[in-house]
Amino acid sequence: MTAIDTQTSLTQVGSLIRGARQNKGLTQAQLAERLATSQSAIARIEQGSQNLSVDLLARINQALEADLLSIGGARPAHLRVTGGHQLSGTITVKSSKNGAVALLCASLLNRGRTVLRGVARIVEVDRIVDVLRSIGVRATWSADGKDLEIVPPALLDLDGIDEDAARRTRSIIMFLGPLLGREQRFQLPYAGGCDLGTRTVEPHMIALRPFGLDVVATSGSYQATVKRDQPEELSVVLTERGDTVTENALMAAARHPGTTTIRNASPNYMVQDLCFYLELLGVRVEGIGTTTLRVHGVTDIDADVEYAPSEDPVEAMSLLTAGIVTHSEITVARVPIEFMEIELATLAEMGLRYTLSPEYPAANGRSRLVDVTVHPSDLKAPIDKIHPMPFPGLNIDNLPFFAVIAACADGHTLIHDWVYEGRAIHLTDLNRLGAEVRLLDPHRLDVTGPTHWSGAEVSCPPALRPAVVILLAMLAAKGTSVLRGVDIIARGYEQLQERLMELGAQIETFRD
């Protein structure tokens, strides 16, 4: 009997089973009764922590009257959304996807054991975990599927790297920083990720050359060599204040035998998470939260540490948007307020009414959290354009959500996405649902509202945030909508549709 033996597959299938069970209105106990098993077994299956035989999958398909997995190749998942309904209740923000992938890469700096608490169980994380395991790292999920223990080997097996997983995530570029402190020569597959237009890796090369890294791109791989005769005092000026570029430079500096000053650094949430983790490893970092970081490197790091990545401000924005566009009153709990203040100020300018709870600390003891309750509001277009900026400005990944919010507001809103050439065009898919979104050029959108949303069938955009924007618009659209090919959403969100259903959203997952 064949078993599904990869953690990624188990997690994805478990999520499908959970969604199908909830769509049928069954509890775990009721499904367990149909399968003549225990509720705890169903819980393990849905968490992705139990192997599934073909026979058991067939029995689950029959019990749920579903076709969850076809032998011989999985078919793409689609969502059927019955919209136009208000939502209600409380939904909790999960930990940061971008923070998690940086911490997974940074665990290679440590010869000791790293335990990451409350890690987001998303495809992007699973791909990095697959890559880590392929090079000899022991990565073990806890029984409840929330915590991840990582123990690197003394010698990495870089020849055994899972090239398929590596090529499907742009996060693989962040292996350069930690590996240059361990290896004299190595190669990595080209980075992949979302379809967002041209995204050069040259800023990473500029950031890492002062550490002795030289990279030649040949035959679909980065061929890297490292020179060890660098001065103890290094000064690195980043040509782009990018999050991943800053993280790469930080990881290179962490094991550099001396002091590194990084200027024009990103102070964004995932960078701060990485700094907090490095401090646990014994690396002193001055200037956290500013654009100048001074890193006191440690040549040999061997520490057993635990760290809980903070909550995700982009997921927080996604969930707030669900309440805003459906004219609902919902509470979004555990919002990292330091990284949402500009977004909330912009929404207040547009007329959104919301209330904040008192602040309280995140599990890492460093980040500040609040609960945000949004109230049904009549929105108006802002006077000025909406555009992203490096932190503390409006988050680049939060910008797409303002397109669907602007479509609900009275008047014209100019949205300027200066970072990505290709992302703005994906937001014109809102027009299929009744919006008036006009593409002025590859970077600018003119949005006219308010919109009388109506259901439609839309193919999922090949970029994560625009895909979620279309899904949220479907929650506002009267009638039935279909979003086809939604697998990309699982790259950055853990069980998003199931969690929206807990607020009253009517969403069904299906395959055809």
Image (spheres, helix red, strand yellow):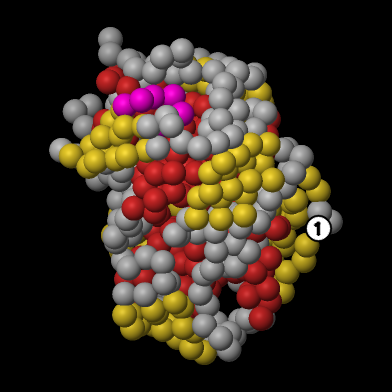
Name the kind of residue labelled 1 in the image: Ser
Instruction: Examine the rendering and report whether any part of residue 113 can be seen.
Output: no
Tell me: 435 left or right of 162: right
Looking at the rendering, which quadrant does residue 73 occupy?
A: top left
Q: Can you say whether 319 is above or below 233 in the image?
A: below
> In this figure, which residue is indicated by the disc labeled 1?
357
Q: Can you say whether 21 is above or below 237 in the image?
A: above
- Name the foreground residue: 464 vs 13: 464
Q: Which residue lies at the image location 57% right of the left edge and 21% below the top edge?
A: 300
View extreme (right): residue: 358
Q: Is 64 covered by the magenta stretch?
A: no
Tell me: 290 left or right of 441: right
Q: Which residue lies at the image location 63% right of the left edge and 64% below the top edge?
A: 392
Q: Provide residue 4's location: percent of width, then percent of height.
A: 34, 19
Q: Which residue lies at the image location 64% right of the left edge and 28% below the top edge?
A: 281
Q: Give the magenta range.
A: 180-185
Q: Which residue lies at the image location 33% right of the left edge and 57% below the top edge?
A: 199
Magenta region, main secondary structure: loop
Looking at the rendering, which quadrant does residue 429 occupy?
A: bottom left
- Name the foreground residue: 220 vs 4: 220
Instruction: Examine the rendering and report whether any part of residue 417 can be seen.
Output: yes
Q: Can you say whether 483 is above or below 41 in the image?
A: below
Mark 1, other Cα within 10 Å: few <14 / some 14–19 / many ≥20: few
View extreme (left): residue: 219
Q: Is 183 covered by the magenta stretch?
A: yes
Give the position of the N terminus as an image quadrant: top left
Q: Can you say whether 35 is above or below 418 in the image?
A: above
Tell me: 442 left or right of 238: left
